[in-house]
Amino acid sequence: MKNIIGMKLIELESVGTVIDPDTLECYPMYGSGGIDLENPVSLYETSEEWFEALSEGDKQILIDNGLLEMIK
């Protein structure tokens, strides 16, 4: 899958986030492409605005990985 970074992180470009599908932790991405591993946020704790900002492509990535179903 081209959206997986390394072995576990999935990039959601529209919200500048990567998500670990095993832990459901979301990590902010820096403009330089780095990942802020010091400030995770649970997918369950993301805001409604965060979900509204997801592109259709990123929503599909969550669906394809079974993650969107987990939080609805």
Image (spheres, rainbow, N blue to C red):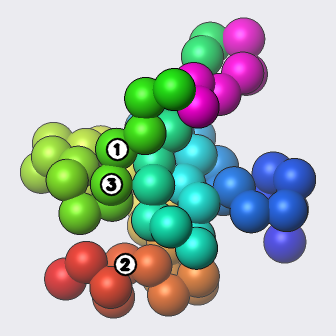
Q: Which mark is residue 41?
A: 1
Residue 28 lies left or right of residue 20; in this view the side is left
The quarter holding residue 39 reads top left
Residue 52, percent across and down? 22, 50
- The residue furthest top is 32
In the image, what residue occupies the spot 44% across and 79% down?
67
Residue 23 lies left or right of residue 8; in this view the side is left
Instruction: Give the mark, 2 or 1, whose residue is nearer the N terminus.
Output: 1
Task: Tell me the magenta residue range.
Answer: 32-37
Q: Which mark is residue 33?
A: none
Gap in Å between the C-alphas at discs 3 and 2? Answer: 13 Å
Residue type beneath disc 3: Ser
Residue type beneath disc 2: Leu
User: Of tags 3 and 2, which is closer to the observer?
Assistant: 3
Residue 45, percent across and down? 19, 53
In the image, what residue occupies the spot 25% across and 78% down?
71
In the image, what residue occupies the spot 72% across and 11% down?
32
Q: Does the CB distance between marks 2 and 1 fall below 8 Å?
A: no
Closer to us: 39 or 12 = 39
Instruction: Give the mark, 3 or 2, whose residue is nearer the N terminus.
Output: 3
Gap in Å between the C-alphas at discs 2 and 1? Answer: 16 Å
Q: Looking at the rendering, in which quadrant would you find the N terminus?
A: bottom right
In this rendering, the answer to whether 71 lies above or below 39 is below
What residue is disc 3 on? 42
Residue type beneath disc 1: Val
Residue 18, percent across and down? 58, 46
Mark 2 secondary-structure assignment: helix
In this rendering, the answer to whether 38 lies above or below 62 is above
Q: Which mark is residue 68?
A: 2
Could you tell me if residue 52 is visible in this image?
no
Gap in Å between the C-alphas at discs 3 and 1? Answer: 4 Å
